[in-house]
Every structure is written in structure tokens, then in C-alpha cells.
Image (cartoon, rainbow, N blue to C red):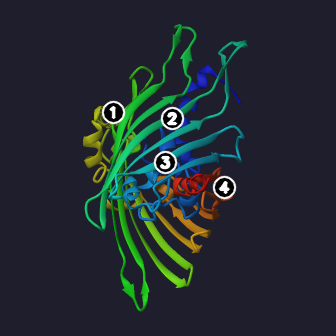
Amino acid sequence: MTISRIFRPALLLFALAFTSMDLLADSKDDFNPVQTGTNSLNIAPDARGASMGDLGAATDPDANSQYWNSSKYAFAYSQGAVSLNYTPWLRKLVNDIFLADLAGYWKLGSGDNQAVSASLRYFSLGEVTTNSPGDTQVAQTLNPYEMSFDVGYSRKLSEKFSMGVVFRYIYSDLGFSDSYAGDQSAGASAFAADISGYYTTYPIIGRNECQWSWGWNISNIGTKISYNHGDNPAFLPTNLRLGTTFMFPLADYHNLALSVDANKLLVPTRPRLKDFQEDGKTDLDAQRDYNEALENWENMSPITGIFKSFTDAPGGFSEELKEITWSLGAEYSYNQQFFLRAGYFYENAMKGNRQYFGVGAGFALNVLRLDASYMLATAQTSPLDQTLRFTLTFDMDGLKEIFGRR
């Protein structure tokens, strides 16, 4: 992929908005997605959550709960686990963009009430070759990427409720430079935190013991990430996730879990010039009001932006509702060894138009579990179609049994 330096902003826009590339809304004038930096933080890392339509706020805890809801680790069944995830991204367009993720946890103390966790994400934007304008002989190869590292702590506050907190460091290197000014631009970094809660109970329905869980997670609460030496600050994708899961037995060793998640970005909407071009207002007045609103948006603090995000959509409350994405999923398990999953993800066409089905399967032994998922976009032209994910998880209890026998 070869681009000229004059088109460097195009690469930046690609990096900031690649998760919403199916941009064909019913009306281009109505298309108004929430704009953030480091959108790779919104990509589901693991095959289990992705196969159920990108959900996991209230599903049973596993090694990848750090992304969905870290407070679930306090209710994990195993002493610890480590998971390796790999996702080839936008494989219909290019073959060198991918997400790699390593996550795990460890239960602390003899009371089994608390856990520590960590994860490392690396998102590669592939290889990009740039040429200076008017000089086709001089080329520079760039390898833009984004990464994050976080650590978390979760604890049971009662027999049914737990909370968790995660601290995250984020780094984005889009590889931009300016050969004329001798400027080798450094990457941008930011700090963020998550806070989450998880509640689970075991109601008796008929003669069967079921499990009903609720979860919430406010993720990526933190600083802005500033590109171009601070001249282009961008909001982190601060997100509110709410979800519930109901699991019930079908027969001995056969269980079915039904889940739903709702997400809303807690990021203020970027002003648009068209929203200030009212009847009776001159172009000069509209431009002045727009410039003032844009400056206020750029200078707004992330915390102020979180509260502003509930009331600032140009279309009012109805547009705020359109910013909510929905995930519906189901997971069938046999003896906690064989799993089948399916789900659906919906995003309003005005806010990104990502709509796709997910399917997947998993197989678990004492020591490891292998999961895979496959994405089927409802729009044939969507670059997210046919996305594959793979997850390999190692269970520490199983490893201890093997080495204990020796």
C-alpha cells in the first residue's frame, strides 16, 4: 500500500475510524458517528465474546474478562488462567492487519474472594510505504500500531456481588513524520482506568437451579490521546457496558445461556457545520458559531465529555438512543467441555452501521481450551465480513494437576 505524504491525514482517519468503515447510511447528511482515537480498544479480543455478538458483561468469568468486566474474576472457578488471542482484521481488504491479545488472572488468598489480572493488546496496522511529493525515488516504510497494557484487581464484596478496577497505559504510533522539517514524530500515549461490577444469583425454577447474572463496566476513563505533538487531541473510547445473562439446564450436563449487552460511548459528539446552518442565519454567523462549538469540543475535558455525551446529540434524545449498540447471544455447553455459540451485533446506520452475526465453537480439556469464531456481516460490502478469531486458554488448575501427579 503506497501513499504520498500529502495524504498523511487519510492514514490518520483510517486508524481512528476503521471500526466503522461501512459508512453507507440511508442519508449521508444524517451519518454522524461518535469520533474517538485508538479505536482498536473497541475490538473484541477473544473468540468466545465475539461469537456471541461481541458481549461479555455478565457471562461466566474466563481468562479474557479483563476486556469485558474485570470484576468477574473474583467469581472465577479456577485458581488462574492465561489466554492468547489472535484476530486477522479487515482481511477482505488487506492481509497484514491484526490484533494480538494476551490476558490472564490469578486468585489471591485462601478465601477465594479476590484476584489480580493483566492484559496486553497489540494492534498492527500493517506496512505502509510513503513517498514525498514530487520525489518518487525516496520512500519510507512505516509500521503503524497501537498497543495497551493494563493491570486489574477484583474483589467480592458479598457472596453475590463483586467489583473491579483496571489501570491502563495506551500507546499509539501512526508513524507520521515530516522530512522537510526534519521532524520524526513520536507516538501518542494516554492513561485510563476501568471500574466494573458483577452480581450473580442462583434462582430455583421448577426443580432446576439456574444462574442469573448482571454486569456493568465503564472502561477507558482517562486522558485524551494527543497526536502531532499535542495539536490534535482525541477522546479515548470511554464506554459504558451493561449486560445480563440467564443460564438454565436443558438436561444433565447440557446448559444454555442467553445474554444481552448494551453499549454507549461516553464521548461528546463532534460539532458539524450543517447543524449551525439554520434558516435566517448567514453563512458567516453559522461559520462563527460552528468554530466556537468546535473549539469548545476540542478543549473539553474527558470527564466533562462523559456527562456531556448524554445530552449533546444534534437530534436530541432520539439520536442519543441511536448511539446505543446492542448484542444478543447464546452459548450451549455440554459438560463444560464442548461449546456452541451464536449472536448478533447491531449498530444504527446513522452511527456506524456495523451489523453482523457471530458464530463459534470451543473445546475444553483439563489444561487448555480452544475457541474460534466467525463473523458474518449483513452487508455484503462490509470489510468486517468473514472475520476470524482464535483463542487458546491454559488453565492453571489443570497444569497443577499434571505436575502434581509427577
Which marked residue is nearer to the observer: mark 2 or mark 1? 2
Q: Amino acid at mark 2?
A: Met
* Sequence-first disc among 1 and 3: 3
Q: Please, is residue 331 above or below residue 223 in the view?
A: below
* Sequence-first disc among 1 and 4: 1
* Sequence-first disc among 2 and 1: 2
Residue toward you, 73 or 396 = 396
Which marked residue is nearer to the observer: mark 1 or mark 4? 4
Q: Amino acid at mark 1?
A: Glu
Return the residue at label 3: 104
Residue, x 41% and y 44% (percent of image)?
A: 237
* Sequence-first disc among 3 and 4: 3
Return the residue at label 2: 147
Q: Please, is residue 11 above or below residue 254 in the view?
A: above
Query: Residues under labels 1 and 4: Cα distance?
Result: 34 Å
Q: Percent from the top left, x then y, of residue 185?
A: 50, 17
Q: Percent from the top left, x then y, of residue 356?
A: 59, 61
* Sequence-first disc among 4 and 2: 2
Residue, x 64% and y 53% (percent of image)?
A: 389
Q: Secondary structure at mark 4?
A: loop
Outermost residue on the front side: it is 406
Q: Secondary structure at mark 2?
A: strand
Return the residue at label 4: 385
Return the residue at label 1: 298
Q: Amino acid at mark 3?
A: Gly
Residue, x 55% and y 43% (percent of image)?
A: 101
Q: Please, is residue 323 above or below residue 219 in the view?
A: below
Q: Secondary structure at mark 1?
A: helix
Number of marks in picture: 4
Q: Is residue 83 left or right of residue 290?
A: right
